[in-house]
Amino acid sequence: MPPVGVEPLLEKLRKAGISEDTYTIVLSPEMVISKRIDVLKKRFPDQRISREELIARAEDLAPPASTYIAFLVLSTAIATGGLLLDSAATIIGAMVIAPLMGPAISTSVGTVVYDRKLITRGLTLQVAGLLLAIAVGAFIGFLITELGMMPPGIDIREISQVAERTNPTFLSLFLALGSGIAGAISIIRNAGSALVGVAIAAALVPPAATSGLGFAFGLPAVAIISAVLVLVNVLAINISALILFWLSGFRPLGSSAVGRARKAVVLNILVLGVAIAILSTVLGLVTYVSSQTALIEQQAKAEVSVMLNESEYEDMRLVTESVDVSYRPADLILNEPARVTVILYRRAGQELPPGIAQRIDDRLTEFTGREVRVRVGFIEAQQTT
């Protein structure tokens, strides 16, 4: 029979007097040759596995504590190195061995079938694992700084892989929601669990490692924003998987247990939903701030180019890609000025327009509505006739 037929058959066996103390083994045949296959498919149109198989898979996905810790420490260490090396390939490689899918799925499965042991184990592994990942990231960061393995004066916020986790947007929330749904589907349909595990780990391990690096390098904003991203992602993964398992029809045995499970599911969805909504305000703020800073940078570069094309400055040329705007989200929040650096070519002996830096400053302030600080540098050029 199809996998979805296992559960109703087991219920009939229980009603016939076969208790749970017996061994029930479910086997998958290599091939079935029968004219009744179409009849079975019509009778069992769904493709989900049975409740018992779901519980068994959830238990298998949550590995023993020693294995879980070992793989989590290794994956976080590799991910931390990938962040500092700005290597997306290294980070992806770390996600392959990260064991975070199992605990998230176990918690959701335990809730819908009202298995408190499974819930407790899943929650414990999730909380302890993410705290451990942050601690490992911090330890590696402290070790690197103490051993002088990073160039002096480097700002990890300028590393693109780190910046990606310190400037999260609502797209990060959609990634986590999608990962949770994909994880539930992969378990229900028994397909692609390994690949989905990579997606779930990608939503959790790199930001956790980034949070640890924030603590190590004395950057509390990096540590806090990344930790918020981790928390939002783990809540989103749990709520999406929980909803999908419940909508797929998984219930505990017994009508009284079904009622308790329904209450637990509704309560968890409400609590997780409210927590996500509250924490998402941080993502919303970061999204707004990031868009505003990007807009200021774009406006400043465009306006400087327009200004230098005017006749008054026709003897000067802008060095290619030489308008640098330093304006971080923290600067916008703290109302700090944008720092604009402009590099110009000028002919040897050419007289400079008086107060050109201030002119650019005034123009950008008026155009962007933001306070700026302008520095203008010159490269003297000579050309043969």
Image (tube, grey):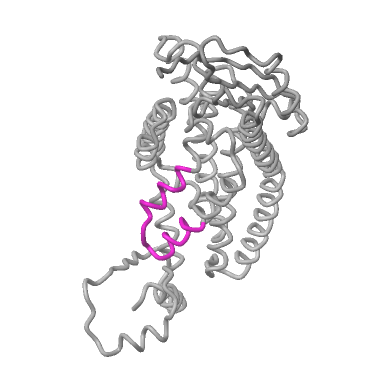
Image quarter in which the C terminus is found: top left
Residue 37 visible in this rendered orientation of the protein: yes
Q: Where is residue 343? Give x, y as percent.
A: 55, 20
Residue occupying image coordinates x 53% and y 31%: 163
Please tell me whether residue 275 is drawn above or below residue 188 in the rendered image: above
On screen, 298 above or below 363? below
Viewer-proximal residue among 259 and 172 = 172
Q: Is residue 322 left or right of residue 101?
A: right
Residue 286 location, quadrant: top right
Q: Is residue 293 visible?
A: no
Q: Residue at x 40, y 65 (%)?
A: 189
Task: Inspect the magenta stretch and tell me whether residue 184 lies in it.
Answer: yes
Q: Residue at x 75, y 28 (%)?
A: 365
Q: Is residue 239 left or right of residue 63?
A: right
> Which segment did they paint magenta?
181-202
Question: In x, y percent, where is residue 175?
Answer: 53, 50
State left or right for residue 7 relative to residue 158: left
In this rendered view, identify the residue nearer to me: 332 or 355: 355
Q: Is residue 119 magenta?
A: no
Please identify the dominant SS of the magenta region.
helix
Residue found at x 57% / y 25%? 324
Observer-nearest residue: 96 or 166?
A: 166
x and y percent of residue 280 in the render?
Answer: 67, 44
Q: Quadrant of the image for the N terminus?
A: bottom left
Compared with residue 47, is residue 186 higher up or lower down, i.e. above or below? above
Name the residue nearer the viewer: 21 or 160.
Answer: 160
Residue 202, above or below 368: below
Pick out the residue farthest to the front. Answer: 385
Q: Position of residue 135 (x, y in %)?
A: 50, 25
Left or right, residue 199 beside residue 346: left
